[in-house]
Image (cartoon, rainbow, N blue to C red):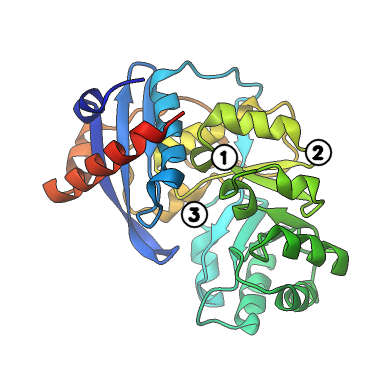
């Protein structure tokens, strides 16, 4: 395990401007580690306390200091990601994901209505054949059941991602709707990530590399669940996306498009990100451009904030 001084020497903290507001932010800060085995990304969201953020640091250290697992495929199908925009804005968002056959649409946004969600989903459905929605736990069971009916009135939904907050709510919803349910937060924020599957609360498991502690931990969980896996990003930079693509490539089977096309949400990134070809992205290591690292570097006080955060998390990394 590297010590803090070594990590500080290898550290680059950047701020990536975003095209649209996502998760309530318009600038994404991440700390990148230039390690002997590659680049790692520590991008736990600012509100996460050290016990949760430590998993994200473990993921960064794995990428920087451990050899990569074996990949079984060299391209990964991805979904387009549509934030809580108006229907009129949908075509411009989808244009950033050329060839994508699947789109994930944000729903249950605070301040918006179910009618807004239906209009947005229908605008996406007119352009992309397969649509999934993500509520980030924003509905009660009653609201989710009503939303499932409304959102499928004009066409199918691949699945509802994290429609409700708790595992018990997800399990109840599955008994009340035929629309498949996917679990995200119930896995990545849980002390026991496998509980949601044992409770038969999900038809699909959405797994994210950084919150779970790295590619190897993701693959370990994927091997223990008996439902299909979708690898998704946690609003990662190009470095983190590269690790997500590696995780998807290392899975024995991959049945669904993955949520790894979020690079299109950034105005600037630390590396030139390849454009999707026929809705897929290539698998391979990502090395940031030194000029971009310099141009996107945060002020000294923000760099120190991230150093202090690493210092708080490092003793908690297993």
Q: CA distance from mark 2 to mark 1?
A: 30 Å
Split into 4 quadrants, where in the image is the N terminus?
top left
Instruction: Determine which quarter of the picture holds residue 38.
Output: top left
Instruction: Determine which quarter of the picture holds residue 65.
Output: top left
Counting every numbered tag in the picture gives 3
Q: Earlier in the sequence, mark 3 or mark 1?
A: 3
Would you say 58 lies left or right of 228 here? left
Q: Is residue 39 visible?
A: yes
Establish if 115 lies above or below 203: below
Residue 96, disc? 3
Q: Position of residue 214 (x, y in %)?
A: 51, 32
Q: Residue at x 36, y 27 (%)?
A: 39
Q: Residue at x 24, y 32 (%)?
A: 11
> Is label 3 in a helix, a strand or a loop?
loop
Question: Which residue is disc 1 drawn over?
Answer: 277
Crowd band around label 1 with a 10 angstrom C-alpha radius: few (<14), some (14–19), many (20+): some
Pick the residue in front: 65 or 293.
Answer: 65
Instruction: Determine which quarter of the picture holds residue 152.
Output: bottom right
Q: Do residues under tags 2 and 1 come within 8 Å of each other at their CB atoms? A: no
Q: Position of residue 174 (x, y in %)?
A: 82, 62
Q: CA distance from mark 3 to mark 1?
A: 11 Å
> Is label 1 in a helix, a strand or a loop?
loop
- Closest to the camera, between mark 3 and mark 2, is 2
Question: Which residue is disc 2 drawn over?
Answer: 226
Q: Residue at x 85, y 68 (%)?
A: 177
Pick the residue in front: 302 or 117.
Answer: 302
């Amino acid at each position: 395990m590297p010590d803090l001084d070594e990590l500080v020497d290898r550290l680059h903290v950047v701020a990536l401007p975003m095209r649209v507001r996502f998760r309530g932010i318009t600038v994404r800060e991440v700390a990148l580690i230039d390690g002997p085995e590659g680049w790692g990304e520590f991008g736990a969201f600012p509100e996460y306390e050290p016990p949760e953020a430590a998993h994200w640091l473990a993921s960064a250290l794995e990428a920087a200091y451990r050899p990569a697992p074996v990949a079984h495929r060299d391209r990964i199908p991805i979904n387009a990601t549509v934030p809580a925009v108006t229907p009129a804005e949908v075509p411009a968002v989808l244009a950033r994901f050329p060839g994508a056959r699947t789109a994930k649409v944000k729903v249950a946004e605070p301040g918006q209505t179910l009618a807004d969600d239906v209009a947005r989903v229908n605008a996406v459905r007119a352009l992309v054949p397969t649509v999934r929605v993500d509520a980030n736990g924003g509905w009660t069971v009653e609201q989710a059941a009503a939303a499932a009916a409304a959102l499928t009135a004009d066409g199918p939904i691949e699945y509802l991602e994290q429609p409700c907050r708790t595992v018990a709510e997800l399990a109840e919803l599955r008994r009340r709707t035929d629309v498949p349910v996917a679990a995200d937060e119930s896995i990545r924020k849980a002390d026991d990530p496998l509980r949601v599957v044992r409770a038969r609360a999900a038809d699909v498991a959405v797994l994210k590399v950084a919150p779970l502690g790295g590619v190897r931990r993701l693959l370990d969980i994927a091997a223990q669940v008996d439902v299909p896996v979708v690898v998704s990003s946690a609003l990662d930079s190009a470095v983190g996306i590269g690790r997500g693509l590696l995780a998807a490539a290392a899975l024995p089977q991959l049945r669904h498009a993955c949520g790894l096309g979020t690079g299109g949400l950034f105005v600037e990134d630390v590396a030139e990100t390849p454009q999707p070809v026929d809705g897929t992205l290539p698998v391979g290591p990502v090395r940031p451009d030194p000029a971009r690292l310099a141009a996107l570097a945060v002020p000294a006080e923000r760099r120190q904030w991230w150093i202090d955060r690493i210092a708080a998390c490092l003793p908690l990394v297993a």
